[in-house]
Image: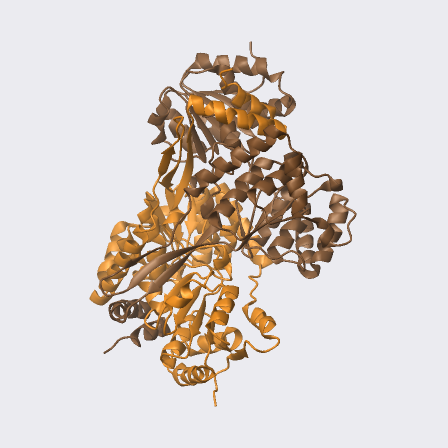
Chain colours: A brown, B orange
Amino acid sequence: MSNTKISRLDSGAPDFLQTLDALLAFESSTDDAIEHAVADILRDVRARGDAAVIDCTRRFDRMDCASMVELELPRSVLDDAYASLSDAQRAALAEAADRVRLYHERQKQDSWEYAEADGTRLGQKVTPLDRVGLYVPGGRASYPSSVLMNAIPAKVAGVKELIMVVPTPGGERNPLVLAAAAITGVDRVFTIGGAQAVAALAYGTQTIPQVDKIVGPGNAYVASAKRRVFGTVGIDMVAGPSEVLVISDGHGNPDWVAMDLFAQAEHDELAQSILLCTDAGFLDRVHASIDRLLAEMPRRDTIAISLANRGALIKVRDLAEACDIANRIAPEHLEICTEDPRALVESIRHAGAMFLGHYSVEALGDYCAGPNHVLPTMRSARFSSPLGVYDFQKRTSILDISEEGAQKLGRIASVLAHGEGLQAHARSAEMRLKD
Amino acid sequence: MSNTKISRLDSGAPDFLQTLDALLAFESSTDDAIEHAVADILRDVRARGDAAVIDCTRRFDRMDCASMVELELPRSVLDDAYASLSDAQRAALAEAADRVRLYHERQKQDSWEYAEADGTRLGQKVTPLDRVGLYVPGGRASYPSSVLMNAIPAKVAGVKELIMVVPTPGGERNPLVLAAAAITGVDRVFTIGGAQAVAALAYGTQTIPQVDKIVGPGNAYVASAKRRVFGTVGIDMVAGPSEVLVISDGHGNPDWVAMDLFAQAEHDELAQSILLCTDAGFLDRVHASIDRLLAEMPRRDTIAISLANRGALIKVRDLAEACDIANRIAPEHLEICTEDPRALVESIRHAGAMFLGHYSVEALGDYCAGPNHVLPTMRSARFSSPLGVYDFQKRTSILDISEEGAQKLGRIASVLAHGEGLQAHARSAEMRLKD
């Protein structure tokens, strides 16, 4: 008899798809009070710069500071944080950083150009962003691994200046986060956070230079601020709760699967862990493992609520159906724990990351395998990608049209421009024609 | 004596940068009435589907329709539109489409994977989006070239279903737009528009399937609706007014430069045309050309207002300074009309597209050279790129970790997970360790 509450579904049930959709439904609500507070802070920082940031930081983070200088951490503080770690932590952080760098170097894109017979040359120039802001949350959700995953692709892309902001409420600093900043080559660190930090990066202040893009996770205030400054600067995605979907054919160790579901559920109560399995007996064994292992977990309360409200153990007809359901879910993380996981790769169209086989556990990807852990959530894997070097590069089209090329192209452009009623377009093309 | 009103600036003036920034400043205002109307329409379409779309279309587009079937154009209507064009128009459209396709095929990205010594394989799987919605405005700003520039990269990427929406107020259809849909292989066309069309594509209705991304330009209602559905579906950028920046060393034909400035200014009164030149005499000659040529332009009223309010002829010290100013502006279109345009390419870091030399006129790029004409506006070339095949592809990380690899990686992950207080993460990695 299983005790732990988690939905048990069967894909053969007549109402299965509605039940599944209800389980997946998540609406990131917008809170009017937060929206108004954020709008006020953005306006204030834009108008008063440093002074507004200092006021907010005194008020929200209880920091006793008089000037922005006090809110910037010198390089030596980062280096000291790195030196203060245990040997094991230092080694783990460095190895993880090396592996993440190695993987991301493969994502770098190069400029290209090609020539046509008449001498016209067309191409695309790829350049890094000049300056990027990296938001790192303070407190409970302050993860050094996030610093690695955001900073390394930016540096691999060639971003010249990477500015990190991290709130330190009451002055409390996280040495692992600062150490991660040290080894990834973050250029400047300010101990500010919230909407005021986003505003400072987006608009620039007397002390903080305007950046071109802001990346990194944050709370509802940070998310709202990022949405509002989008356009003035680039932003990465606004992430939803984290999700894992496991596909199993009944082989493997049920304890491993249970723990993988826990690893997602322990993030927060909204995190989502779902298992699809062709074998009803295996689902029972995983449920039993959940019952047995849950008590050992320090974050068991969070895990239990997450599994009860958002988790599911689902019996599916076969692996083909499992893939169909996976594509409908478009999960952030997909573990394929089957005897022949490669056989399913072609059938999966939407997923942030695929983990193949019993040893490809999500936690390895979260920290150190190499690929990025910033992944599309809430079905956005249908149209977006893991954070990568490409998010810190941009493209410029190159058009180098020869005199001869302009003859041929000018006639085409002229016809189409007249068709659109844009006569100056037509004339500027026609003026280059020789006859 | 020049008559046409346009700012004449000198980079040597003490207040030059403030004057330039004021000229560039453009705030896309949000209108409360529009915001509320759009929110209502989205809610209605989400709740009532087809019925709401039909109601809106009757009301806003004065269409006498009773069901969605009447609002879908069969393939034969598109083919008839193509057949109805003049031979010259058909040829121009086909040649433009071929060239745009050829260029964009170079942007296609492939999946990759690499193996490590212990058998671990890491990679990235690239897949097309399943289904994309293409918004095409009705009326004055209805451009067949936009259909080419949005539809072709989607099809090159491998998007299986491309659904176009185009309002036909009062039933009036644009044959060039429908012909462009025919030759680019658009799969379905609905004669709907506004926020109701965006909502239908984003949420799906009984007749219109939910898409994964919505691209294409639109008015303030469409822009607001796109911003609001972002997250449920992907969107392209919300574009600002179009801009051209011309860099000149005083060589070339002043009439050509004047007409290139007109070609931008004729779009609308907010369009921005700026010339940077090292030669004061050439600036005078361009100004004289503007005076002489303006009267001939059918859209002279729009051009005159655009040049007076947003245009500028700017004397710069040298070409190096011109490049600095260009990087500050980060223009959508940059024409480099100098004797050696290639010499400046390295110095330009931010531009949507660069047009090199006197024959690389923007109008050729707008229609048929090959590169996309959907480009980042309002300084967003600092962080974003031309529309491309990459906007219709997405990536999935592949992690295929060997048993041996899991030993090495598991130890690193365990250390870092404990450091972050995520014990289930640590345990799921540790469970794969052999000792």
Residue B420 lies, in percent from the top left, at 62, 30
Is residue A207 visible in this depiction of the protein? yes
Left or right of B227 on screen, residue A422 = left
Is residue A10 visible in this depiction of the protein? no
Q: Is residue B396 above or below residue A162?
A: above
The residue located at (27%, 50%) in the rendering is B75
Q: Is residue A165 above or below residue B311?
A: above
Residue A309 lies, in percent from the top left, at 58, 26
Q: Quadrant of residue A418?
A: bottom left
Q: Quadrant of the C terminus of chain A?
A: bottom left
The answer to which of A111 and A231 lies nearer the viewer is A111
Q: Is residue A56 above or below residue B291?
A: above
Left or right of B161 on screen, residue A64 = right
Residue A84 lies, in percent from the top left, at 67, 34
The answer to which of A46 and A144 lies nearer the viewer is A144
Residue B109 lies, in percent from the top left, at 35, 45
Left or right of B49 on screen, residue B13 = right
